[in-house]
Every structure is written in C-alpha cells, then in structure tokens.
Image (cartoon, rainbow, N blue to C red):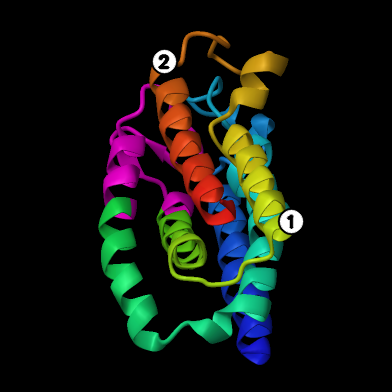
Amino acid sequence: MHIFAVFFVTVVMYGLWVIEGTMAYRSRMFFPSQLAQTDYRRYLPFIAHGGAMWGDPIIVNPLIFVIIWFYGGQWSILDVTYTSLIVWPINILLHKIWAQCRYPDCLAWGGELTPAGCHHFIYMGLAMTVLVQFYFDTKEIDPWFLWCTTAALTAHLFLGTHKVLDIINPAWWNRKFIGDIQGWLSLFIVLSALYWRTYTLIR
C-alpha cells in the first residue's frame, strides 16, 4: 500500500495537475495576460484558481498520500469500487452544475468543461473517492489527524470556491464578496456534512 500511495499521488494526481495547467496554458487561460487577449478577460485564469492551481497540489495531494499510506490497507478493491459507484455520479452532477455557473473560469464556462476542466473532472473524482472512503469506511482514525484533515479541506473549499478572491477582489475579478449566493450555499452544505461526519467519528 505504501508503494501504491507513492505512485498514486506522485504519478496520477500530480500528473493530472500538470496536465490541467498545460491545457490551461495552451487554451490561453493560464495567466491573466493570456485572458486579456480574449473576450474573457475578466474571468478566472488557472494561476489564480485557489483550488485547482494551489489547493490541489498543496493540500489535497499530501492529504491523500498520508491517508492511503496509513489507512489504505483497510480497504479492499470491492470497497473502493462501491464508493466509486456513489462518488462518480455525484462528480458528474457537480461538474454539470459548475459548467452552468454564471461566473466562468479556466475550468468551465459556456455550459461546458474546458480541456483543463476535463482533466480536473478526473482528478476530482479520484480525490473524492479516497476522501469518502476515508470518512465513511475507515476504522481507528487518529482524532488529531481527522481534525487536521477536516480543517485542511475547509481551507481548500474556501480556496476552490474563490471566496479568497472575493475578499481580495483583484482588478480582473468580476464578482463581489456577498453576491455569490449559490457558492455560499454550496459551501455551507458541504462543510456542514464534513463537520457532522467528523464529529460522529470523534464521538
């Protein structure tokens, strides 16, 4: 399982992240200066995407590595298969909703995923599978590590839903802090479920 953890995170997860960035660059969506040359100059470039650019490699990938390293031995292939059958339809639904968002970014706009967004779809499905497996089918989780994981995922969610950008509000950002009701509602629902599950595991 240790060898698998190294391979899965370093090759698969970081590999997908690199491909996302490469696709965004080739689509002229990596830097604000690239977007400035298009009709989408006030939308979100990949380098400023708090989730895909920064949260995934700095927060999610290390978490997944540690989770698989210490707890992956509890899971069977059948366990992961069952979890995948639940997670991937949810992942499809989330990306369909994301593609319809009225605040387009480098991963989705115009009702469709961009080339970078298609690879992020794969990345997110794999990450969600591991995290759901961890939270719902893992025994004897260290309480301290569980709370640290939940706190780290909270930070990632704030980054990934662009709440940090809403606060900083750079010149090329076209959204106001309190204007994204859908984003705040989604964030509240996910965080409520995350902290409820954390509490039930600790109790």
Image quarter hosting the N terminus: bottom right
Three-letter amino acid code of the residue under disc 2: Ile
Spot occupied by residue 136 in the image (x, y as percentages of width and height): 43, 63
- At x 36% / y 22%, what residue is drawn? 102
- Residue 80, picture quadrant: bottom left
Judge whether residue 178 can be spotted in this image: yes
- Residue 47, picture quadrant: top right
Spot occupied by residue 100 in the image (x, y as percentages of width and height): 30, 31
- At x 48% / y 49%, what residue is drawn? 197
Q: Earlier in the sequence, mark 2 or mark 1?
A: 1
* Residue 64: mark in rendering: none
Mark in front: 2 vs 1: 1
Q: Is residue 36 left or right of residue 75?
A: right
Say which residue label 2 marks: 181
- At x 28% / y 62%, what residue is drawn? 86
Which range is magenta? 91-117
Q: Is residue 19 left or right of residue 189?
A: right
Spot occupied by residue 171 in the image (x, y as percentages of width and height): 68, 13
Instruction: Pick whichever, 22 or 197, lies toward us.
Output: 197
Answer above or below: position of 44 versus 148. Answer: above
Instruction: Pick whichever, 123 or 172, lies toward us.
Output: 123
Spot occupied by residue 184 in the image (x, y as percentages of width and height): 47, 22
Answer above or below: position of 75 versus 103. Answer: below
Q: Is residue 80 left or right of residue 8?
A: left
Q: Is residue 71 left or right of residue 87?
A: right
Secondary element at tag 1: helix
Q: Residue furthest front?
A: 203
Three-letter amino acid code of the residue under disc 1: Trp
Say which residue label 1 marks: 144
- Residue 79, picture quadrant: bottom left
